[in-house]
Image (cartoon, coloured by chain):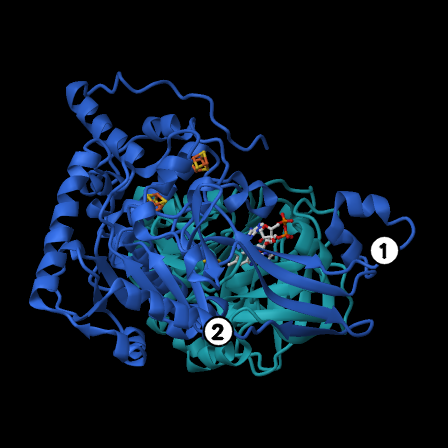
Chain colours: A blue, B cyan
């Protein structure tokens, strides 16, 4: 596959000065919604801002603590609500929200690639069923204008270069900005981006050949610094992909990796490409009656079901395939009982050729967040490195003597 | 297919259609090993589907679960669900009364391939409540009986009390279905009767009772995972049916039914969208990565 970071495709380009870029954002913040990186207690987070002085500019951070998927696939979201109208009847109310056009400013390439991944899945393209697009996601996503900023400094955990996730992209963004010695190069990547450029045409100027050349050089330089910044973290994604796709790794390998997972779910919650969610129905206002207190303490849902509650909501919230209950079925049927089996599934989904084929890209964009989040060092590049090591070990000791015994596994006690 | 799309378009992907439960029948008593199983007869409301598809069924106040449609689409005035009280939501479903409304989202999934079966012999292998999704297909075939060759049904359950749809078996036999049944444990009476050929033992022991032509037989399997595994093994090894001619329907934890929540993944397949019906050839490929049964 061609590396997107090298930017082979020719895009429409403009040039903007720093003051004019600020004017564009200022103007937008006044009449629309502007979401931008801000600094909160030393961490960088995306937030809606009204004053552009709150923006934490690209030179001050590598990436935000959590990806901006929060704005299109919130941690918790109501799908619908329903109400009992009489003894036997219910009415369902769909929640439709009015979303305002929103500029998401300062997104990094890996997160742009993450959103493109979510689009392909949640908008039904992967199944060629756009008619089955997720309505809640679509409504929000359509209103978002992505202005990304090309990274010029990589963190030790960054590995977008190995995952087609950056540091610069050729698609997925509406505008892609690159900071130059003077001003910014603006690459326009979509119709939305063109519309925005038309709207602010008086602040944009044609990009000079020098500006385009400088941008290319800067991207080439940053790609070189990846080796310098993170020689060890450079994920051998292709090698790892081969190993999960075939699959070449034995159960012992996965139980060893799995034994380090404490099932916190963090890896999926902070991953820009993870979309899995759980759904529950819960009473909105359980009308409590005397004697309900105990029931409520043990199972709030039951109070509702006994017919005393009348209003319910159905909400979805983030879920993670590393958690034990993710695939639990009624009747004691329990696929992927151990953390090891669940690790295998997770990395298969992220790195395999099978999913690469279905999704048109790897399930990892190289943001490095799981590496920083995981308490048990089950971050993706760490595991990918171990995969290649395991294969090397096997070559040296074909009898598999290096594989540890089945360690403690957190299976379902049943 | 188009009608299905229209159905989701019209309602919004996650919004259930309200359907009234017109009748509720006890199928299996609570004392049976599998616990209580009931049939819920729903008004049809113009919903089109194929045998083997399922729906996301909302029990208001409790939640939503995937349930197979166990009646044939040609039965035009109703949809029947056969449900075991297996947990919280299905338990709540068992408490509703005729006249109550439930939520219906679907049909979901691919369903059984029927057209390729024309002119072929059909072999059903079912275990326990696994007969529910297969019954829709069986009846659909019987509505156009002349299109198909022999139809055989091998059905097994834990005990005689756990066998589903016993009252329909004479009708199936009349229409030329060769029915063979088994129970894991007999009750001293059942095994002595002779309405259908029967055996005490797991359902795969019935394979010895039948003679088929593997070149012209298509097999459909549904049941608990272990049973699926052994049935598929028997079909290919003992009865010599090609993997492309064996189909099984899988069950997985599902939250959305429309390829969004990620719960139903097996290897590189989403059971709710790519399945729940898979050929053994596909299942074998999946099994290299992750055991689907
Ligand atoms: C395609 C398909 C068809 C099915 N057809 C039938 C049928 O015709 N008749 C029938 O009785 N049962 C059927 N089931 C199984 C039925 O969906 C489960 O028994 C039911 O989900 C259990 O939910 P619960 O709340 O009662 O149990 P709990 O154990 O309380 O489950 C809690 C939650 O876990 C999830 N869950 C648990 N078990 C399953 C499971 N086996 N499958 C999916 N999600 C699960 C559900 O989301 C549920 O809300 C089918 C399942 C699938 C996937
Ligand atoms: S792999 Fe790490 S981050 Fe993910 S659930 Fe396990 S401990 Fe948490
Ligand atoms: S798997 Fe890890 S490094 Fe890859 S995109 Fe997800 S959080 Fe980032
Ligand atoms: S049930 Fe949600 S993705 Fe299949």
User: In the rendered view of the protein, which quadrant contains the C terminus of chain B?
Assistant: top left
Disc 2 or disc 1, which is closer to the eye? 2
Task: Pick whichever, A332 or B149, lies toward us.
Answer: A332
Residue furthest front as drawn: A19
Write the residue at 25% across / 42% down: A154
Q: Residue A312 at what x, y percent from top left?
A: 71, 63
Query: Of marks 2 and 1, which one's residue comes earlier in the chain?
Result: 2
Q: Residue B247 at what x, y percent from top left?
A: 39, 58
Q: Judging from the image, what secondary structure is the residue with disc 1 in? A: loop
Write the residue at 30% across / 43% down: B288
Q: Residue B118 at what x, y percent from top left?
A: 36, 73
Q: How many marks?
A: 2
The answer to whether B46 is drawn above or below residue B263 in the figure is below
Q: Is residue A30 visible?
A: yes
The answer to whether A299 is drawn above or below residue A178 in the figure is above
Q: Is residue A15 left or right of residue A273?
A: left
Mark 2–mark 1 distance (CA, rounded to whole Å):
38 Å
Q: Are marks 2 and 1 on the same chain?
A: yes
Residue furthest top as drawn: A401
The chain that hosts pointer 1 is A
Task: Pick whichever, A407 or A235, lies toward us.
Answer: A235
Q: Is residue A225 left or right of residue B278?
A: left
Q: Is residue B242 visible?
A: no
Q: Is residue B185 left or right of residue B121?
A: right
User: In the rendered view of the protein, which quadrant contains the N terminus of chain B?
Assistant: bottom left
Disc number at residue A100? Answer: 2
Disc number at residue A288? Answer: 1
Disc number at residue B100? Answer: none
The chain that hosts pointer 2 is A
Q: Judging from the image, what secondary structure is the residue with disc 2 in? A: loop
């Amino acid at each position: 596959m061609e590396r997107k970071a090298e930017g082979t495709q020719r895009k429409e380009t403009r040039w903007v000065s720093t003051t004019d870029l600020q004017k564009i954002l200022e103007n937008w913040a006044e009449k629309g919604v502007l979401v931008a990186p801000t600094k909160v207690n030393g961490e960088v987070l995306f937030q809606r801002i009204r004053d552009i002085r709150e923006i934490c500019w690209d030179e001050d951070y590598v990436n935000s603590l959590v990806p901006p998927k929060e704005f299109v696939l919130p941690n918790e979201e109501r799908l619908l609500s329903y109400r009992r109208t009489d003894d036997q009847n219910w009415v369902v109310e769909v929640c439709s929200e009015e979303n305002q056009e929103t500029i998401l400013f300062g997104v990094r390439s890996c997160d742009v690639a993450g959103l493109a991944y979510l689009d392909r899945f949640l908008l039904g393209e992967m199944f060629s069923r756009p008619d089955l697009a997720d309505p809640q996601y679509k409504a929000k996503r359509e209103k978002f204008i992505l202005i990304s900023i090309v990274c010029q400094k990589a963190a030790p955990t960054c590995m977008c270069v190995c995952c087609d996730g950056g540091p610069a992209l050729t698609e997925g963004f509406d505008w892609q900005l690159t900071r130059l010695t003077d001003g910014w190069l603006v690459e326009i990547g979509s119709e939305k981006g063109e519309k925005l450029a038309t709207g602010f045409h008086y602040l944009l100027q044609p990009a000079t050949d020098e500006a385009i050349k400088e941008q290319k050089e800067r991207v080439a330089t940053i790609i070189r610094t990846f080796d310098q910044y993170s020689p060890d973290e450079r994920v051998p994604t292709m090698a790892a992909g081969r190993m999960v796709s075939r699959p070449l790794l034995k159960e012992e390998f996965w139980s060893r990796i799995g034994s380090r997972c404490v099932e916190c779910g963090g890896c999926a919650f902070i991953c820009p490409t993870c979309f899995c969610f759980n759904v529950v129905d819960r009473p909105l206002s359980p009308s409590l009656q005397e004697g309900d207190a105990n029931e409520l303490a043990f199972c709030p849902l039951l109070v509702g079901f006994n017919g005393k509650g009348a209003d319910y909501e159905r909400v979805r919230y983030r879920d993670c395939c590393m958690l034990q209950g993710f695939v639990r079925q009624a009747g004691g049927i329990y696929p992927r009982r151990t953390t090891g089996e669940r690790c295998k599934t997770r990395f298969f989904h992220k790195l395999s050729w099978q999913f690469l084929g279905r999704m048109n890209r790897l399930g990892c964009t190289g943001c490095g967040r799981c590496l920083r989040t995981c308490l048990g060092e089950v971050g993706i590049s760490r595991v990918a490195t171990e995969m290649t090591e395991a294969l090397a070990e096997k070559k040296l000791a074909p009898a598999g003597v290096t594989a540890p015994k089945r360690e403690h596994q957190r299976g379902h006690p049943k | 297919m188009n009608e299905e799309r229209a159905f989701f378009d019209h309602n919004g992907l996650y919004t259930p259609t309200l359907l009234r439960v017109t009748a509720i029948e006890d199928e299996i008593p609570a004392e049976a090993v599998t616990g209580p199983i009931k049939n819920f007869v729903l008004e049809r409301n113009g919903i089109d589907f194929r045998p083997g598809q399922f729906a996301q069924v909302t029990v208001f106040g409790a939640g939503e679960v995937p349930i197979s449609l166990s009646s044939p689409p040609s039965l035009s005035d109703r949809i029947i669900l056969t449900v075991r009280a297996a947990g919280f939501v299905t338990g709540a479903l068992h408490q509703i009364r005729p006249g109550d409304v439930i939520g219906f989202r679907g049909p979901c999934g691919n369903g059984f391939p029927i057209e390729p079966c024309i002119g072929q012999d059909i072999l059903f292998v079912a275990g326990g409540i696994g007969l529910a999704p297969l019954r829709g297909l069986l009846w659909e075939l019987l509505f156009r009986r002349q299109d198909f060759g022999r139809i055989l049904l091998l059905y097994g359950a834990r005990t005689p009390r756990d066998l589903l749809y016993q009252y329909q078996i004479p009708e199936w036999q009349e229409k030329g279905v060769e029915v063979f049944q088994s129970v894991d444990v007999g009750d001293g009476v059942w095994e002595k009767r002779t309405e259908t050929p029967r055996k005490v033992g797991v359902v795969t022991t019935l394979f010895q009772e039948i003679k088929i032509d593997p070149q012209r037989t298509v097999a459909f399997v549904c049941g608990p995972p272990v049973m699926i595994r052994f049935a598929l093994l028997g079909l290919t090894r003992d009865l010599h049916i090609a993997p492309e001619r064996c189909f099984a329907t899988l069950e997985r934890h599902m939250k959305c039914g429309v390829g969004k929540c990620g719960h139903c993944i097996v290897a590189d397949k989403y059971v709710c969208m790519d399945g729940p019906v898979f050929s053994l050839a596909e299942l074998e490929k999946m099994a290299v990565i992750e055991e689907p049964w």
